[in-house]
Amino acid sequence: MRNFDYVAPTSLAEAVQAFGQAGDKARALAGGTDIIDQIRIGRRTPELLIDTKRVPEMMVFEGDGAGGLRIGAALPLSRVRDDAMVQSTFPALATASGLVGAVQIQNRATLGGNVGNAAPSGDTIPPLVVLGGTVVIAGPRGTREEPVGDIFAGPGQMTLAPDECLVEFRVPAPKANSSSYYVRFIPRAEMDIAVVGVGVALTLNGGGQIEDVNISLASVAPTPVRATDAEDVLRGETLTAALAREAGEQAEHHASPISDVRGSADYRRELTKVLTRRAVAACAAQLGVNVS
Amino acid sequence: MTTTNRRIVQFTVNGNSVEVAITPRQTLLEVVRDDLGLTGAKEGCSNGNCGSCTIEVDGVTINSCCALGVEMDGREVNTIEGLAPGNDLHPIQKAYMENGGFQCGICTPGFILSTDHLLKMISNPTEEEIRLHLAGNLCRCTGYDKIVRSVQAAAEDMNS
């Protein structure tokens, strides 16, 4: 493997200084499950890896005091996957955290890495987006908080400046009578990358109608996208099997997929319809509304 | 930056404190095999798919081909060599032997450490839980059925 330097800051201030000085010559090393392979095959050539796992702010995992959650960008996904509060309150995020690679990968890989790689297929991204997740970004010009859905510029590219870094994710408390669901299609049982992934977060009102719904699609566009047309046909309505199907049809408007080794563009468009329908129905079923 | 940016890294391996002078580009797998002479963990795919390099760091299994040696400062590393004391075999190792859980053996140290990790989390796993937990370990000899049976036998032995 090509050589590089390595630092392991032990405070956020040190980390910000390291990223600030190195700029685009540095990459974050959190779980390492992508960056080390990327260096080995020559796809990325950083001069410096900044290990973020000894920065306390990047390893935080605690409630926000208002029913929401703070998850450090360098915390292993297995911690998210196995957490009882995540499983009960943010089920889509628990599911997705258990789908990234196998157990050995989940013991190392992180939300910061899965999001920061900005792959259109990142499994944890649709759940974070539909749950209203934000990410804290630090850099030499200060700290800011952005909606997770707003930080993607294209495949493998975030909107962050080269001297900025991801610190933590914040997921707000869901409203009463809410649930979330993530489903992806892969041609085998485990260990693959989503051909299409769909995240749904749903809130029902007292009358059982859909008060609010967020839908996010993975692997169908250069960045993760919101399926707002599908959300619009659902909002205010009582869910039926026909309406779930219509939401799938509407979701396809937001799919502009490519054909690659994992599936053709046509196949991905069809999957978008089917998986959106299933994800909406499954999410509603978690709230006791069964339409299928 | 030079190609000799070695640094001293201290951690424990199988309970013993070690100190190595390594460069950042050395993976944990390379450090364990080449610097420490522990060759149980194998290099297979080199990209985190096959699990033949599986070792335990701070109580959880990882792919050591996708970790750097320099990250290990102060951490607890356990390899297949440390699973059982002396010349004894661990119940999981015995179960793999008695149930034909390996043939060529390249993948076996990784499978056994993944099994150990599973049984620490779930002492009596279902077949589905076993297959899910071992999805990151590939075997090209056995067809997996005998591995599943080995894990079930190990769980039974360790729970009795």
Image (cartoon, coloured by chain):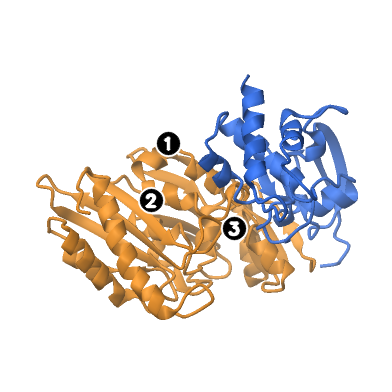
Chain colours: A orange, B blue
Q: Residue at x 27, y 62 (%)?
A: A277
Image quadrant containing the C terminus of chain B? top right
Instruction: Identify the mark nearer the N-term, 3 or 1.
Output: 3
A96 in relation to A79, above or below: below
Which label belongs to residue A117? none
Q: Which residue is mark 2?
A: A92
Image quadrant containing the N terminus of chain B? bottom right
Instruction: Give me the C-alpha separation between circle 3 and circle 1.
Output: 32 Å
Q: Residue at x 72, y 46 (%)?
A: B110
Q: Which residue is mark 1?
A: A84
Residue B47's x, y, as percent?
Answer: 69, 61
Name the amino acid, label 3: Val
Q: Residues within 10 Å of mark 3 (few under 14, many from 20)?
A: many
B34 in relation to A231, above or below: above
The verdict on a common chain for dots 3 and 1 is yes
Which type of secondary structure does the marked residue at label 1 adopt? Answer: helix
Q: Is residue B120 visible?
A: yes
Where residue B122 sits, quadrant-wise, is top right
Residue A90's x, y, as percent?
Answer: 36, 46
Instruction: Give me the C-alpha separation between circle 1 and circle 2.
Output: 13 Å
Q: Which residue is mark 3?
A: A16
Q: Is residue A226 visible?
A: no
Closer to the camera, A268 or A198?
A: A268
Instruction: Give me the C-alpha separation between circle 3 and circle 2.
Output: 31 Å
